[in-house]
Image (spheres, rainbow, N blue to C red):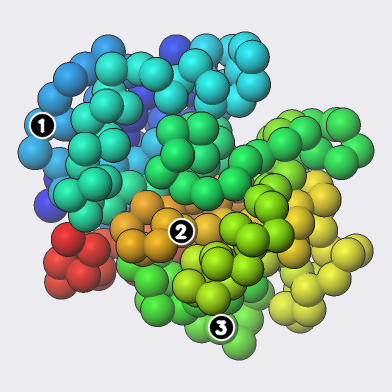
């Protein structure tokens, strides 16, 4: 199994992602530069966090036009699994591969801390191994993480079970107090209607190693690998 990690100028979580996929998950990883036009036969594509192109204009707006994104869009259109974390999530929304947008946090500040998220749809390629009875503790680190979509889009997403995660407290209760950035409906992660493109603001790669004292994020990668091995997202 071969996983491609896309690297843009300004990516700063790419090494974290490569480490988890290669050392923890024991998979072959291909680093894909933003100017590449060949995905090199990967089985899945991951867009890591960071500040692609310095977040000029708005987060993900320039990266969306990188040559590699043309190939990522073709890959997704054919049913390939694409996963974006933080800035990667922002890029996928800018590219139209995911609905909605990520806006400035409601307090207008960069937020870096652990948060709790609960799984909403546990039957996707990214969530199939998650126990819905427990909240996951995953770190966030973003200035533009407030998810927004209009009412009609939200209605369709809820009906299609496209909401993956919601911010919650340690007991799994979703509330205004547990929402760190003002995201509409406490949304922390979503997927497209075909359920092969996924995005989330929290960083599971920063919670996947015993050395960090937190492995709550590991189940997300385990779900992803199981789905790929069974070709559930292809």
Instruction: Give the label, 2 or 1, closer to the camera.
Output: 2
User: Quick check: can you spot residue 222?
Assistant: no
Tell me what residue is drawn at x 40 percent, y 62 percent. 193
Tell me what residue is drawn at x 62 percent, y 68 percent. 155
How far separated are the C-alphas under marks 1 and 3? 36 Å
Which residue ends up furthest to the left in the rendered image? Answer: 41
Mark 2 vs 3, N-terminal side:
3
Crowding around mark 3 (Cα neighbors within 10 Å: few <14, some 14 to 19, many 20+) is: some
Quadrant of res 172: bottom right
Residue 185: where, in percent of width, then height?
75, 64
Mark 2 vs 1, N-terminal side:
1
Assign the C terminus to one quadrant of the image.
bottom left
Quadrant of res 87: top right
Crowding around mark 2 (Cα neighbors within 10 Å: few <14, some 14 to 19, many 20+) is: many
User: Quick check: can you spot residue 193?
Assistant: yes
Q: Mark 3: which secondary structure? A: loop
**Relative to 161, is 135 on the left or the right?**
right
Looking at the image, residue 156 lies above or below residue 198: below
Looking at the image, residue 19 lies above or below residue 24: above
Q: Mark 1: which secondary structure? A: loop
- Mark 1 — residue? 40
Labelled disc at residue 132:
3
Q: Mark 2: which secondary structure? A: strand
Question: Which residue occupies the foreground of this view, 47 or 29?
Answer: 47
Tell me what residue is drawn at x 45 percent, y 20 percent. 63
**Relative to 147, is 40 on the left or the right?**
left
Tell me what residue is drawn at x 62 percent, y 81 percent. 134
Which residue ends up furthest to the bottom in the rendered image? Answer: 133
Question: Which residue occupies the foreground of this view, 60 or 179?
Answer: 60
- Mark 2 — residue? 191
How far separated are the C-alphas under marks 2 and 3? 17 Å
């Amino acid at each position: 199994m071969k996983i491609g990690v896309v690297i843009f100028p300004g990516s700063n979580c790419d090494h974290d992602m490569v480490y988890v996929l290669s050392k923890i998950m024991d998979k072959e990883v291909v680093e894909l530069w933003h100017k590449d036009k060949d995905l090199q036969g990967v089985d899945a594509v991951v867009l890591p966090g960071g500040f692609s192109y310095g977040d000029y204009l708005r987060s993900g707006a320039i990266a969306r036009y990188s040559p590699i994104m043309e190939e990522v869009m073709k890959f997704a259109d054919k049913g390939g699994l694409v996963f974006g974390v933080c800035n990667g999530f922002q890029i996928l929304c800018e590219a139209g591969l995911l609905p909605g947008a990520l806006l400035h946090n409601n307090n207008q500040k960069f937020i870096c801390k652990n948060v709790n998220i609960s799984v909403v749809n546990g039957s996707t390629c990214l969530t199939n191994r998650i126990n819905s009875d427990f909240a996951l503790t995953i770190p966030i680190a973003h200035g533009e993480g407030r998810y927004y979509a209009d009412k009609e889009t939200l209605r369709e997403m809820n009906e299609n079970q496209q909401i993956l995660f919601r911010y919650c407290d340690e007991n799994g209760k979703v509330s205004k107090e547990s929402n760190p950035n003002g995201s509409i409906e406490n949304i922390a992660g979503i997927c497209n209607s075909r359920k092969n493109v996924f995005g989330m603001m929290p960083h599971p790669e920063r919670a996947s190693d015993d050395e960090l004292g937190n492995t709550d994020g590991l189940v997300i990668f385990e779900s992803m690998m199981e789905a790929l091995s069974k070709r559930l997202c292809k």
